[in-house]
Image (tube, rainbow, N blue to C red):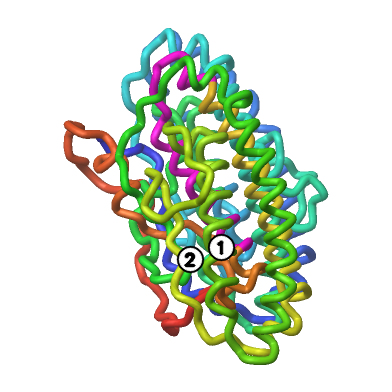
């Protein structure tokens, strides 16, 4: 796969000054004003670029440089606003910021793609609205850190704001979730402004520099198949009904088992073996059902949550010793994760809708959408396992590296990747080897 023309470079070390974090919204006011002024100029420049690209087959150099600087500036500013970077950003989109874009020079574009760019944008606009949390993809001057239209980006930033005030450091998972949304938003706007005719890449696994983690609740991929049966895709909702009903019934028993497990873990520091196995099977089964329903996998799942029985699998570690304080206050500690879970749930729903149409048209689930669904499902499984006391490791909020989910691995016979990745992490901050957020 050829390199994406819009690539992200991150060199931030995750350290934050509490005072600048606390006043981040106020410190950003000059940039909001400048962004408004620049956007006024960017609109006619975008129209001129559309007409010129339609006539010449490529974006003129001057317009390309102006609009590229605009997209770079917006990305740098929003990285600062959403706590993916600490240093105050420049006002001109110059190179060298802690979170920056590398934008390729003008290239030949297909005129039919330029002519129909507005229509072609619609699927990406739906996804960018739930990743960035704003229908404009993150460049609206009315958006703030505490926007009520929470998507993945503002939800992760809100949690990072509280965490940075407490720890003087942004958790790695939250920072990576922010960067993932920012990169997709940047690629969306580069495509919209005709800086490239390469469609935005939704695949979080296409981003080198992601951490490889060993969590108690892990995603395991046993099948690289992306083909989908159009018939089962069309009736996926109906086919899922028996599983959804059984899942509700099983959930009643799981709730009772979780209450018993809570008392036992609080007293003994470890959940009983049988309760752990029962709840682990429930988590696996729920993951199988939702992976099928949301088109992350194709086979009809079994009804018992058996291990190694599905292409996408959740591996639950053997029952660990757990901190009694974390056990006692589990329902309070889980509240921040529930906020991010809500954002991931919306992303998952939109991905399923886009994947449904694409699978019907092509008989194949796009790898980017499949991997985005896998990311959301993995987070939901880790959250459920945390609530059910299968582990006291907090859910990891950002994408992590899964080689089996890589698009080259998933597409047998696909050519090897060439060129630079879409995401480059210049300096990986050293982190303690602990479970949960890093």
Q: Give residue 333's mark.
A: none
Which is more toward the observer, 285 or 433? 285
Find the magenta span and give its range. 357-384
Name the residue: 55% across, 29% down: 124
Taking the view exactly as shown, the residue that stands out farthest to the front is 274
| Percent x, y of residue 71 | 54, 42
Q: Residue at x 74, y 57 (%)?
A: 145
Q: Which residue is mark 2?
A: 217
Main secondary-structure element of the magenta-colored stretch: helix
Helix, strand or loop at label 2? It is: strand
Q: Is residue 372 magenta?
A: yes
Instruction: Give the Cα distance between marks 2 and 1.
Output: 6 Å
Badges 2 and 1: C-beta atoms under 8 Å apart?
yes
Q: Label 1, on which residue?
A: 382
Residue at x 67% of width, y 76% of height: 261
Q: Residue at x 62, y 65 (%)?
A: 83
- Split into 4 quadrants, where in the image is the N terminus? top left
Q: Is residue 258 left or right of residue 395?
A: right
Q: Secondary structure at mark 1?
A: helix
């Amino acid at each position: 796969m050829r390199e994406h023309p819009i690539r992200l470079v991150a060199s931030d070390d995750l350290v934050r000054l509490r005072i600048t974090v606390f006043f981040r919204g106020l410190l950003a006011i000059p940039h909001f004003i400048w962004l408004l002024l620049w956007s006024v100029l960017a609109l006619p420049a975008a129209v001129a670029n559309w007409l010129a690209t339609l006539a010449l087959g490529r974006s003129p150099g001057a317009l390309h440089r102006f609009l590229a600087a605009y997209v770079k500036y917006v990305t740098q500013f929003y990285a600062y606003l959403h706590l993916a970077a600490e240093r105050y950003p420049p006002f001109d989109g110059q190179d060298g910021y802690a979170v920056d874009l590398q934008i390729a020079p003008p290239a030949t574009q297909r005129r039919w793609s330029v002519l129909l760019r507005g229509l072609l944008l619609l699927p990406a606009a739906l996804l960018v609205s739930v990743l960035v949390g704003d229908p404009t993809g993150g460049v609206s001057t009315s958006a703030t850190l505490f926007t009520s239209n929470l998507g993945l980006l503002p939800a992760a930033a809100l949690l990072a704001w509280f965490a940075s005030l407490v720890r003087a450091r942004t958790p790695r998972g939250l920072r990576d979730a922010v960067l993932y949304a920012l990169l997709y938003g940047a690629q969306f706007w580069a495509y919209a402004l005709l800086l490239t005719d390469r469609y935005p890449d939704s695949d979080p696994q296409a981003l080198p520099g992601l951490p490889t983690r060993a969590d108690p609740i892990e995603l395991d991929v046993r099948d690289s198949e992306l083909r989908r049966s159009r018939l089962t895709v069309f009736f996926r909702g109906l086919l899922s009904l028996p599983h959804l009903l059984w899942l509700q019934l099983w959930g009643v028993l799981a709730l009772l088992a979780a209450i018993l497990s809570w008392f036992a873990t609080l007293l003994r520091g470890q959940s009983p073996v049988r309760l752990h196995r029962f709840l682990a099977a429930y988590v696996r089964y729920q993951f199988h059902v939702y992976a099928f329903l949301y088109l992350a996998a194709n086979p009809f799942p079994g009804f018992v949550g058996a291990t190694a029985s599905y292409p996408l699998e959740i591996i639950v570690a053997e029952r660990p010793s757990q901190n009694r304080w974390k056990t006692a206050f589990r329902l309070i500690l889980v509240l921040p994760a529930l906020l991010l879970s809500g954002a991931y749930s919306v992303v998952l729903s939109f991905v399923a809708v886009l994947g449904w149409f694409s699978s019907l048209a092509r008989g194949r689930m796009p790898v980017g959408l499949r991997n985005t669904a896998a990311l959301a499902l993995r987070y939901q499984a880790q959250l459920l396992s945390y609530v059910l006391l299968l582990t006291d490791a907090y859910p990891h909020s950002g994408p992590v590296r899964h080689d089996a989910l890589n698009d080259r691995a998933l597409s047998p016979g696909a050519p090897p990747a060439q060129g630079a990745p879409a995401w480059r992490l210049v300096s990986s901050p050293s982190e303690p080897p602990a479970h949960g957020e890093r």
